Amino acid sequence: MILFWGACAMRSLAGEVPGPILPTAVLSLDGDQWLLAPDPKNVGRKEQWFLAPRPDAKKTKAPWIIQDAFPGYHGVAWYWREFTAPRNDRPGGRYLLRFWAVDYTAEVWLNGVRIGAHEGGESPFVLDATHAVRPGQTNRLAVRVLNPTHEPIDGIVLNETPHRNKALPYTSGSAWNQGGIMDSVELLLAPAARVEDLFVRPDWKTGDIRVQANLRNASDKPIAADVEFSVAPAAAGETVGAVRLRRELPPGDTLVEGQLAVPSPRLWNLNDPFLYRVTARLVADSPALVDEYSVRCGFRDFRFERGAFRLNGKRIYLRSSHTGNCCPIGLELPHDPDFLRRDLINAKMMGFNAIRFIAGVAKRYQLDLCDEIGLMVYEEAYASWCLADSPKMPQRYDESILGMVRRDRNHPSVTIWGLLNETPDGPVFRHAVSLLPRLREMDDTRLVILNSGRWDSQGSGLAGIESWSNPDRVDPCVTRNGTKHPISGLGITWAPGQLAFHPGRDGEYAAVRWTAPEDGSVEISAAFASIAERATTDVHVLHNGKPLFSAGINVRGGGPEAKFRQTIAVRQGDTIDCACGYGNGNYGADTTALAVRIQGPGGKRYDAAADFSPSHNPSGPWCYGQLAPGPAPIAATFARFAKGRTEETVGTLSNPGSKVWEDVLADRHPYQRVPHTADVIRTLRTIDGQGQPLFLSEYGIGSAMDLIRIVALYEQAGKPEVEDAQLYRSWRDQYLADYKRWRLDEVFARPEEFFAQSIARMAGQRLLGLNAIRSNPNVVGHNLTGTLDQGMTAEGLWTTFRELKPGTTDAVFDGLAPLRWCLFAEPVHAYRKTPIRFEAVLANEDVLRPGKYPARLEVVGPDAIPVFRRSLTVVIPDSKGKPEPPMVMPVFAEDVVIDGPPGKYRFLATFEQGAAAAGGEVEFFLTDPAQMPPVEAVVSLWGDDPGLAKWLSEHRIQTRPYSAAPAAERQVILASAAPAAPGGAAAFADLARRIAQGSTAVFLSPAVFAKEKNPTGWLPLVNKGALTGLPSWLYHKDDWCRRHPIFDGLPCGGLMDYAYYREIIPDAAWVGQDPPALAIAGGINASQGYSSGLYVSEYELGAGRFILNTLRIRENLGGNPAAERLLRNMLRHAARDLGKPLAPLPSDFDQRVKAMGY
């Protein structure tokens, strides 16, 4: 064999000069010898810029982005490079230019000759430049690149192209709209016939490898050739199988197929990723040519089967994280190429067995590394997210997705193709569903996941729901359960035959209209009811636009149901509208059932549910549509819905070899509020797939971005003025302004320490969430958000400059351990001598063999004092594989009263023999109510809050009702509710007067200040600012408090402890008010963009003071010791000046009160 091919390569033919026969050679055109110029007016083609570089062109490199040389520029740009082309002595040889990726379109000239163009930002393309090249001379390559914007250029706009979540203008959490030559450029010197592509499909069970080679004959005559396929271990080289075929290659492309056999193949596994190399070799005699192409591959099978992900038949828990491959400076290209390798090595080290490339293909060298280290890949393309519909959407979507498949289908590490991410139902989703047959023609060996998060709702058990809506959105809508059984999904349950409607996200009313077919008297009966978890809607009945009935569902004093019945006279053509709005102004979970029946003249009955049609609108006298947003529904704005359909189940995945979408797995993104309270932890422990195994394809908790260090790293790299550096610097400056304004130097030793504390405490939050998820028997896999700080956010396990976040490596390694104790103690902050629920759950990824394993549970208090101990035996049954033992096993659950000193406690679990589990520790706190500080002052209660008055009395805190009569002394005033009637300006002016004379008011709840729709309307400040929600989920604020009497005896002086204060920390903050005398506690969001506000602040008014608060103290009195201690501290602090005499009012008091709006 070796001698044969050596002879083929070296032999000479009759009449030819002896010498070597050369296969394709590759000359790299990468490097810093490129020039770049913008073309903002798109005149380059007309002015023939392809002939010579522009005078204003700047030096750049390729691959690299346009925006490094020209920050903020988008549109058309031109690249130029000169190179010397070697002679191509191969008979009939061709010169080819290969571009591995240009984002988004490329048009290419060589020596002024146009040689071709390509559309698609991630897929490689090859252009034949033979007719334009000048061998042995200097050649000038010109590339016109379009980086789309929202204005059409060449008929192309950004959102209608595959662009992931690029934003213009940029917003944090999005991808930058970068463009340019994004991967290598190469000159290929090829023979007349060459191996253009090679696709191999190893069969892990048989050892066979199916081989497909695309052979391209660029000449104008057929070529007879020998084709050999061979296989060898990639790291060794000894051939273990080969096959030789004789083929005649007509001009153009010829697909040649063959099969190799590897005896006793070594599998590609996570812990032993064994690779083979398959080579295709082409040899012809006339003309004399040889070409060779090889790829690496591996024997493996990955699928979802029998309720679990399985690699080579073995059940695994899928442990993944997603990366957007975001980088500083180069945005999607690393200025240090090791960054993107480090991501993969760190992920593998932390315990992940897969990496998800979200809405963008991996770099080629990343896939090579994944092949080598045993890290599976879940890969998506640009078209997987945020692609808008357009006439060219189908072809652009296909080019993006199938281009990814074609480029990467030989990598054994690539086990999942992802088609979409968080895409609602609509044209793009429906097209993705239809793509499966074409994808299977290209690759039938991989798992395909349809739509991460299943925002389309087609896989959530809604089959049988009939609906009418607008073509571009699923709401507002009118729906009906067209089946004879209940349908549950998305937190909604429709009874058989039940009609319902849902308002729109922008405030549109959903409406069902009946048009009178004749004159007469009609009886209208309408019943509205919440069928979502807790719909909060306003419902209406109108006759010719005039209101007959209005009510709230779970808002405006209404309960979960509302009913209406009335007899009215109608004339032919009159309209009766039943409308549903979003009630409290918050969109979502507002599905409201509607049962409306009308009895007309002569006893004829009309029933909206029974008469519903998913195919006709109108349907008889009924019509389904929407009314315009507004404070009340306006019948004249009725617009009929145009899109009717019946929901069908579309499965989440397609297994290898399958050509259908299989409904066997649920897929969700259950992001939760931070900090995680008991309810959140319970949700993560119990969330399910409604009867199916559940894949959490996104969930995580981030940190703050270290804005000071990040800016310094850009400066250190010599890139302080690139776009991303400028944005980080603007956020840093906002933070430093807050730091100075709020005197945070009294809280943190230096500005950097806020970020250091945030980043360090993320580890505990990550572990908290992983602990809960690993205890959930419904969850079979988890893709963690996110691998790194990407999209100018801090969602990652390490920073954008690839610096590890302290403690996170250990926490994630612990949380992902195949065998671990998941422990729970609730409540996490309790009173002494009250019951605490202790639970121990064992997560076991088939680590323990069948048998008995002795274990010990214990609770230790301050100074390691033991207060509880229990021995038990964990039994792993021998099920003989049928059924498989559960991966999650509850071991212990019991309520225990702990009577010990106040402080921090730990609940511990330990195997005593035969097993070494991770986890096994959780903390909780005890407080002794006897040690609560007394409140000596008599408290004046302002506002009607009988519950608060009762709690204060039960806890021996003296109170009296607030009196408007002139006070004879200074007072401690506690306000937690709106003032008694008539309230308003007079009540607040009187309170301001009392404060100005020396009293102190504690405003326990922001609701005190609500004035109609303005939540800060009655604040005793001239500049009332706003009450604003700060981010409190994946991207979250960090909450700080200073050392102050209000936090006496509590953890303080830095970031607030997320365990100790988890129920107390609010979402809302005071923002934009007059500066306080002292900022006591607040929140800073440096996780996504920058925003900030105060939770507790103290203001001076005359001789007195008032305290603004948003901490959730009132809501947690009686159940959380921290709430009680904070209230007592506030009241004690407010009483510090009670002994002083009343002060006279300031001379300008009346003017100040008037300026406050009183």
Image (cartoon, rainbow, N blue to C red):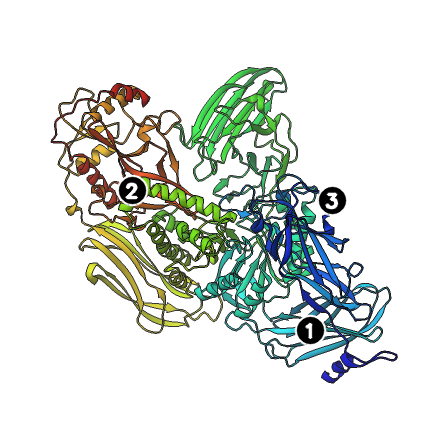
- Between circles 1 and 3, the one closer to the viewer is 3
Give the amino acid at mark 2: Arg
Give the structural element (helix, strand or loop) at label 1: strand
Disc 3 marks which residue? 47
- From this viewpoint, is residue 1017 visible? yes
Relative height, residue 602 to residue 452 (above, below): above
Relative height, residue 832 to residue 955 (above, below): below
Please give the count of numbered marks on the rendered protein.
Answer: 3
Disc 1 marks which residue? 279
Question: Of callouts 2 and 1, which one flags the residue occurring earlier in the amino acid sequence?
Answer: 1
- Between circles 2 and 1, the one closer to the viewer is 2
Give the structural element (helix, strand or loop) at label 3: loop
Question: Of callouts 1 and 3, which one flags the residue occurring earlier in the amino acid sequence?
Answer: 3
**Disc 2 to disc 3: CB gap under 8 Å:** no
Disc 2 marks which residue? 743
Nearest the viewer among 713 and 7 is 713
Q: Quadrant of the N terminus?
A: bottom right
As measured in the structure, the alpha-carbon distance from the residue carrying label 2 to the one carrying label 1 is: 68 Å
Q: Quadrant of the C terminus?
A: top left
* Residue 669, percent from left and from top: 48, 50
